[in-house]
Amino acid sequence: MNVGVLFSGGKDSMLALLRAREEHKIACLITLVSLNKESFMFHTPNIDVTTLQAEALKLPLVRVVTKGEKEHELKDLKAALEQAKRKYKLQGIVTGAVRSTYQATRIQQICHELNLWCFSPLWLLDQIELLNEVLKRKMKVIISGVFAEPLDKSYLGKQIDKALIAKLAKAAATHKINPAGEGGEIETTVLDMQLFKKPIVVKKSSTVYENFAGTFTIHGAGAK
C-alpha cells in the first residue's frame, strides 16, 4: 500500500515509519508546523529539523503551517492529508500514536472522511518496550523537551540509552509519569537511524528550563 507518514521527527513517528515500511511503500512524510507551542495535536520542539530528516531519508516532505488552535488545527491537518493524498496517490496514513485517544480518534476521523486507511503500528505498545526498540534499531534520539516532575534539566539534550531508560522507568514508578512521554512528559528528536544517508549534527543549541518544564532547542544543524 502507498502510505504517507505523519511525521514529527521524534522517536514515535520514526519507529512507526520503520514498522510500516516492512509491509508498505512510504511515499512521503507529512509535517504540521504549529505556531502554538501548546498545541493539543502536534509536536513542536525542533519541528524544523524534519526538513533535514526528510533529506536524510530521501523522502519528499509535505509541510503545512498551522496556528495550532484547538480543533481548528484539524482543518489544517485535513488539508495537509488531502494535499499529500492527491500529490503522492496515497492509500493510507501512518501515525506514531501510542495511547493518546485524543489524537488517534481525530486522525482516524479525518482519514475516514478522505477515504484513507489509518495505521498506527505502535498503538498500545508497552512504553519501556518502545524505548528499548529505539536502542535495538540503533536510533540516535535526544530529549528535546521535558514537562513533568521529576524530569530535571539534566535530561535535556541527552541521548536515549540504557541508563536513561532506567531513569525514566524509575520516574514512572515514583511519579506515575509515562516513561515514553505519552502524556506529554517528554519530547524527542531523532538525529540518526539506519535509513539516514547521513546523520544530523547539532551545531548550535540552547536550553531553557524552569519548574520541571524545559526545552533543548536546535538553532543550527546539518548533515555530517
Image (spheres, rainbow, N blue to C red):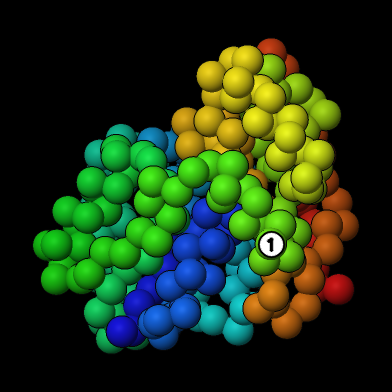
Rendered location of residue 90, percent (x, y): 29, 80
Rendered location of residue 99, percent (x, y): 38, 41
Residue shown at 62% from the left, 48% from the top: 131
Instruction: Look at the numbered disc 1 and give the secondary structure of its residue.
Output: helix
Whether residue 36 is visible:
yes
Question: Up-down: is 163 above or below 5?
Answer: above
Q: Nearer the viewer, residue 126 or 213?
A: 126
**Could you tell me which quadrant the N terminus lies in?**
bottom left
- The local crowd at label 1, few if under 14, some if 14 to 19, many if 20 or more residues have their Cα within 10 Å, is few
Residue shown at 70% from the left, 69% from the top: 193
Image quarter of residue 138: bottom right
**Could you tell me which quadrant the C terminus lies in?**
bottom right
Question: Up-down: is 141 above or below 171?
Answer: below
Q: Amino acid at mark 1?
A: Lys
Image quarter of residue 150: top right
Question: Up-down: is 126 above or below 170?
Answer: below
Residue shown at 69% from the left, 62% from the top: 136
Mark 1 lies on residue: 136
Residue shown at 79% from the left, 61% from the top: 221
